[in-house]
């Protein structure tokens, strides 16, 4: 199933619970345990969450979706946060619709969010292109070519 101009995403294929109600489509979010409006951005988010669970073996209990936090007295929401067993953010992801280019603004946005959350890994994805950054021990950001194997850090 594809909702973004007929293009498929750069993720494995997953089975989702999708329903239609009053002409609107909804997808079941296994983290929030409810149906959510199926927007192009949500389609990407649900693929990323499924990838984290099924391919990277991240326990669902350690994944947060639309995590609220405050930065400079303004409320924000992180698209996806993976926590370690101590409850500290390990990975922060920002999802965009497949038709949205990943720009410097998206990088700036996730970096601002990470100023508060302090995750080791940042992922920015539009479902087609994935940008993955890791904070090194000497506080430098490096670009990774693949999704990190994070289960050993959980």
Image (spheres, helix red, strand yellow):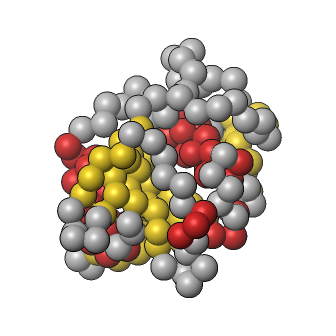
Position of residue 69 relative to residue 52, above or below, is: below
Could one spot residue 67 in this view of the protein? no
Residue at point 40%, 26% (across, down): 99
Give left or right: position of 48 versus 97: right
Occupied quadrant, residue 72 = bottom left
Residue at the bottom extreme of this rendering: 86
Q: Quadrant of the C terminus?
A: bottom right
Q: Residue at x 21, y 62 (%)?
A: 140
Q: Quadrant of the N terminus?
A: top right
Residue 140 seen: yes
Question: Does residue 131 appear to the left or right of 149 in the view shown?
Answer: left
Image height check: is 82 above or below 123? below
**Residue 61 position within the rendered picture, expressed as x and y whole percent measured from the top left:** 69, 70
71 over 10 or under it: above or below: below
Question: Does residue 145 appear left or right of residue 149 in this picture?
Answer: left
- 119 relative to 1 in the view: left or right: left
Residue 63 percent coordinates (x, y): 61, 65
Q: Quick one: which residue is furthest to the top in this view?
A: 6
Name the residue rendered at 37%, 73% in the picture.
Answer: 117
- Residue 77: percent from left, percent from top: 43, 64
Could you tell me how many numbered marks the image carries? 0
Is residue 58 shown above or below 28? below
Q: Quadrant of the rendered structure where residue 98 is?
A: top left
Picture quadrant where residue 32 is located: bottom right
| Residue in the image at 22% along x and 46% along y | 105
Closer to us: 113 or 20:
113
């Amino acid at each position: 199933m594809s909702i973004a101009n007929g293009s498929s995403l750069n993720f494995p294929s997953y089975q989702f619970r999708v329903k239609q109600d009053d002409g609107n489509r909804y997808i079941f979010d296994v983290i929030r345990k409810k149906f959510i409006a199926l927007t192009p951005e949500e389609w990407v988010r649900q693929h990323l969450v499924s990838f984290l669970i099924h391919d990277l073996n991240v326990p669902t209990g350690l994944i947060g979706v639309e995590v609220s936090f405050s930065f400079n007295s303004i409320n924000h929401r992180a698209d996806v946060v993976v926590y370690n067993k101590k409850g500290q953010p390990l990975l922060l992801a920002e999802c965009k619709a497949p038709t949205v280019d990943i720009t410097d603004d998206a990088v700036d946005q996730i970096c601002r969010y990470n100023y508060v959350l302090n995750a080791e890994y940042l992922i920015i994805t539009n479902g087609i292109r994935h940008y993955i950054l890791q904070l090194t021990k000497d506080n430098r950001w490096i670009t990774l070519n693949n999704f990190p194997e994070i289960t050993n850090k959980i």
